[in-house]
Amino acid sequence: MAVFSTVRFRVKPGRDQEFLDAHKTVAGDWPGLIHANMIKTGDRSYCLVAEWPDMDALVEARPNMIATLDSFRDT
């Protein structure tokens, strides 16, 4: 059964493009990912919704997802 993960983000002023660029390669960087949508929910705020084939795939990809977070944490 497919599972979904959602993450909310608040980006520092003037860093939106840097933040979005960090997410351009997640399809290749997160093994098992079926699809991801980055949604702008307001001024400097975003929500990422990702679809996975099952919970095991999501758990397996967590180290890669954390690495992506670490790459823009200061934005």
Image (spheres, rainbow, N blue to C red):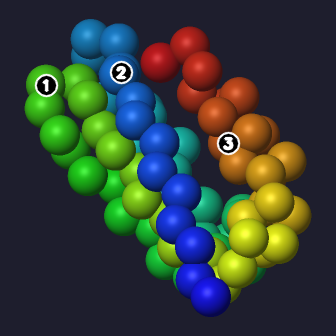
Looking at numbered disc 2 in the image, what kind of residue is underneath it?
Val
Q: Which mark is residue 51?
A: none
Looking at numbered disc 3 in the image, what kind of residue is underneath it?
Thr
Looking at numbered disc 1 in the image, what kind of residue is underneath it?
Asp
Location of mark 1 (residue): 43
Q: Which mark is residue 11?
A: 2
Q: Can you say whether 21 is above or below 24 in the image?
A: above
| Left/right of residue 55 with respect to residue 69 in the rendered view | right
Identify which residue is drawn at 67% across, 42% down.
68
Identify which residue is drawn at 53% across, 43% down.
22
Q: Give yes or no for contact between labels 3 and 1 (Cβ–Cβ under 8 Å).
A: no
Q: Is residue 36 visible?
A: yes
- Element assignment for label 1: loop
| Left/right of residue 23 with respect to residue 9 in the rendered view | right
Identify which residue is drawn at 47% across, 18% down.
75
Closer to the chain start, of discs 3 and 2, is: 2
- Element assignment for label 3: helix
Q: Where's residue 45, x and y in %? A: 26, 29
The quarter holding residue 28 reads bottom right
Closer to the chain start, of discs 3 and 1, is: 1
Location of mark 3 (residue): 68
- Residue situated in front as seen by the camera: 4 or 44: 4
Q: Can you say whether 16 is above or below 20 in the image?
A: above
- Residue situated in front as seen by the camera: 21 or 27: 27
Closer to the chain start, of discs 2 and 1, is: 2
Q: Give yes or no for contact between labels 2 and 1 (Cβ–Cβ under 8 Å).
A: no
Distance from Cα at disc 3 to Cα at disc 1: 22 Å
